[in-house]
């Protein structure tokens, strides 16, 4: 659950703030701590939220693959907020929750298909510094998914990096969305350091 953020959450005020919090509560059931942090610069908040909203309309790539990829980035970078939120979203999208809860230990888990494993490895390789994506990774996924889906998956992973890294830098942590809807806790890697290879 939430600890202290590096920038204190601002009070969300005014007519615009009231509308925004009402909409967020209707969607999520609560106002995330991150909203108060990003409220300090509403242009940034709106740009990030607007791009995230546009991504939800893309449909060339399987929703489960995109969600698991985002979760893999969150786990790899260490963003508990994004990991928790996407687990919650997997529930709302009726995705396979046994798979979603296993993403943090996907290398050790036997629930993922070979394609899902390739997607998770690609998400981590795109998130590595420097990026460790290989020609073989891209070609294998491109053949299986098609060009349009591959471009979309790549953009979703890039967006996941765009959102996870500032959350970690600002110490924005999980608000407990998954726990609030009764989901089992996310799996933990069996061995420390097992997430990265």
Image (cartoon, grey):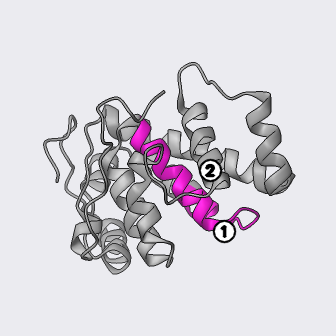
Q: Main secondary structure of the magenta part?
A: helix
Query: Residue shown at 85%/49% (left/top)?
Result: 143
| Image position of 17 (left or right of 5) | right
| Relative to 162, 193 lies left or right | left
Tell me the residue that label 1 is attached to.
Answer: 57
Give how far across and how far down residue 39 sits, in percent: 32, 51
Residue 152: where, in percent of width, then height? Answer: 72, 53
Question: Against 12, is 193 above or below?
Answer: above
Mark-to-mark CA distance, 2 and 1? 12 Å
For marks 2 and 1, the one nearer the N-term is 1
* Res 163 visible: no
Other residues around mark 2 within 10 Å, as few (<14) / some (14–19) / many (≥20) = many
Residue at image coords 42%, 70%: 97
The one nearer the camera, 183 or 130, is: 183
Asked if one can make out residue 106 in the rendered structure from this viewpoint, the answer is yes
Count the numbered circles shown: 2
Q: Specify few, some or many for label 1: CA neighbours under 10 Å numbering under 14, 14-19, or 20 or more.
A: few
Q: Is residue 102 left or right of residue 80?
A: right
The residue to which callout 2 is attached is: 156
The structure residue drawn at horizontal position 62% and vertical position 50%, both measured from the top left corner, is 156
Tell me the quarter of the picture where residue 177 sits: bottom left
Question: Magenta stretch?
Answer: 52-76
Q: Is residue 190 above or below residue 184?
A: above
SS category of the residue bearing label 1: loop
């Amino acid at each position: 659950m939430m600890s202290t953020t590096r920038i204190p959450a601002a009070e969300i005020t005014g007519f615009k703030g009231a509308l925004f919090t009402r909409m967020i509560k209707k969607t999520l059931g609560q106002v995330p701590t991150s909203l108060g942090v990003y409220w300090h610069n509403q242009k940034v908040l709106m740009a990030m939220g607007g791009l995230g909203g546009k991504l939800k309309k893309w449909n060339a790539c399987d929703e489960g693959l995109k969600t698991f990829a985002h979760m893999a980035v969150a786990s790899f970078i260490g963003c508990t907020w994004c990991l928790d939120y996407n687990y919650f979203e997997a529930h709302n999208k009726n995705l396979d929750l046994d798979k979603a809860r296993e993403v943090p230990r996907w290398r050790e888990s036997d629930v993922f298909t070979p394609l899902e494993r390739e997607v998770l490895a690609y998400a981590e390789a795109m998130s590595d510094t420097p990026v460790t994506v290989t020609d073989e990774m891209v070609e294998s996924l491109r053949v299986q998914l098609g060009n349009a889906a591959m471009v979309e998956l790549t953009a979703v992973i890039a967006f996941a990096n765009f959102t996870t890294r500032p959350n970690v830098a600002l110490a924005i942590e999980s608000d407990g969305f998954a726990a609030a809807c009764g989901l089992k806790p996310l799996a933990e890697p069996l061995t420390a350091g097992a997430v990265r290879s």
